[in-house]
Amino acid sequence: MNYLKQKIFGAVKDDLGDIETALEENLTPYVELVHQTASHILFSGGKRLRPLLMVLSARLCGYTGNYDKTFSTIFEYLHAATLLHDDLVDGAKLRRGKPVAHSIWGSPVAVLVGDFLLSRSLSIGTETGRLKIIKVIAETTENMSQGEIHQLTRKGNIDLSESEYLEIIRRKTAVLIEGACRTGALIADAATEEEAGLSAYGFNLGMAFQMADDLLDYTSDTGSLGKEIGADLKEGKLTLPVIRSLKAATPEDRTWIETILANKDFSLRGFEKLRDMLDAYGGLDYTRNKAIKYVSDAKAAISVFARSETKEILLNIADYALERDA
């Protein structure tokens, strides 16, 4: 795992440095409070996966221009905006190991700075001069908003189905990664089949990425994860490990699981017992196997491209999405 991480980040070190510079240079608020709040979420240790995927996708399609790093900020600003809003909606306390923005500057500021970042991403999108890219950004934002609302309306409901869960994470997570990869192809004037291949790669990678996150809520620790362990449960979110285990559990164990799901103040011992049940009833393995299939589909989607260093990085990122520990 460490070798794969070092291999990826060693290969993209210069790109990540350029992306970091572009994120600072293109933020450009005139109110200092906006800069402080946005910087708190933007420069707190994010992996820069989405802008990096846009840059790599463009390069894979032969892009030779000078604006890929600037355009890539669209997707990190969008991502940061959703995190500001999500943390507020979910009542979260930690993000990347730090206090959430609304606990420092208040809810109104967190909402408005999130709005600023959404608008900033669209403004940068207009600089591409391409209506198709602006449409991708707008549709991505619509989907993410509706995914969050869908999840919000189903919080605490133990009858959430697997198909509903998949639709929620498609909108919440996968569409943004898909949009980043597709935009990379668009700025490079890629062929239709290349655009489709990278879009499919991004979609499947996003699905695997979210499932891996859902597994980490039960298999990681607060220090590695950067947020409270069991945060999904405390926020009333049913994820695939729980959905699958509820389906397989005995009536007695199902009743116990439902009881702990209803109790937002569950103990560490209770959480550990739940984790053991998810393991025993196959919820963790089932989720991991589903994620493995999405990783495989992501890698297959870019088979249209010839072998290259950039393609190899994208293949490694697909594997890393599942194997990471945070």
Image (cartoon, grey):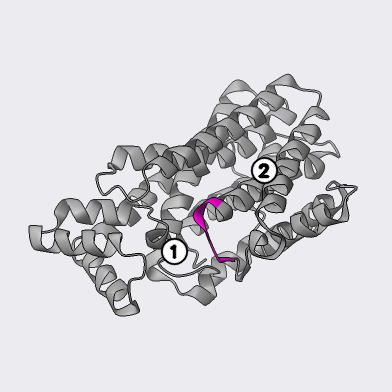
Q: Identify the residue at image location x=37%, y=40%.
A: 166
Q: Is residue 300 left or right of residue 177?
A: left
Which residue does the numbered mark 2 point to in the structure image? 78
Choose top left, top right, bottom left or bottom right for residue 269: bottom left
- Residue 315 in sight here: yes
Q: Identify the residue at image location x=79%, y=45%.
A: 69
Choose top left, top right, bottom left or bottom right for residue 261: bottom left
Q: Is residue 120 left or right of residue 31?
A: left
**Start and end of the magenta stretch?**
89-94
Mark 1 is on which residue type? Ala
Between residue 9 and residue 217, name the one nearer to us: 217
User: Extreme left residue here?
Assistant: 251
Of tags 2 and 1, the one toward the viewer is 1
Residue 196 included in the magenta stretch of the image: no
Q: Give how far across and how far down residue 153 sits, in percent.
A: 40, 40
Q: Identify the residue at image location x=81%, y=42%.
A: 70
Q: Identify the residue at image location x=62%, y=64%.
A: 7
Between residue 254 and residue 203, name the one nearer to us: 254
Q: Give how far across and how far down residue 146 sits, in percent.
A: 50, 34
Q: Distance of mark 2 from mark 1, alpha carbons?
A: 23 Å
Q: Give how far across and how far down residue 264 sits, in percent.
A: 36, 65
**Residue 148 to residue 41: above or below:** above
User: Extreme bottom residue here?
Assistant: 269
Q: Secondary structure at mark 1?
A: helix
- For disc 2, the neighbor class at 10 Å (few under 14, some 14 to 19, many from 20) is many
Labels 2 & 1 near each other (Cβ < 8 A): no
Q: Secondary structure at mark 2?
A: helix
Which residue does the numbered mark 1 point to in the structure image? 231
Q: Is residue 260 left or right of residue 78?
A: left
Mark 2 is on which residue type? Leu
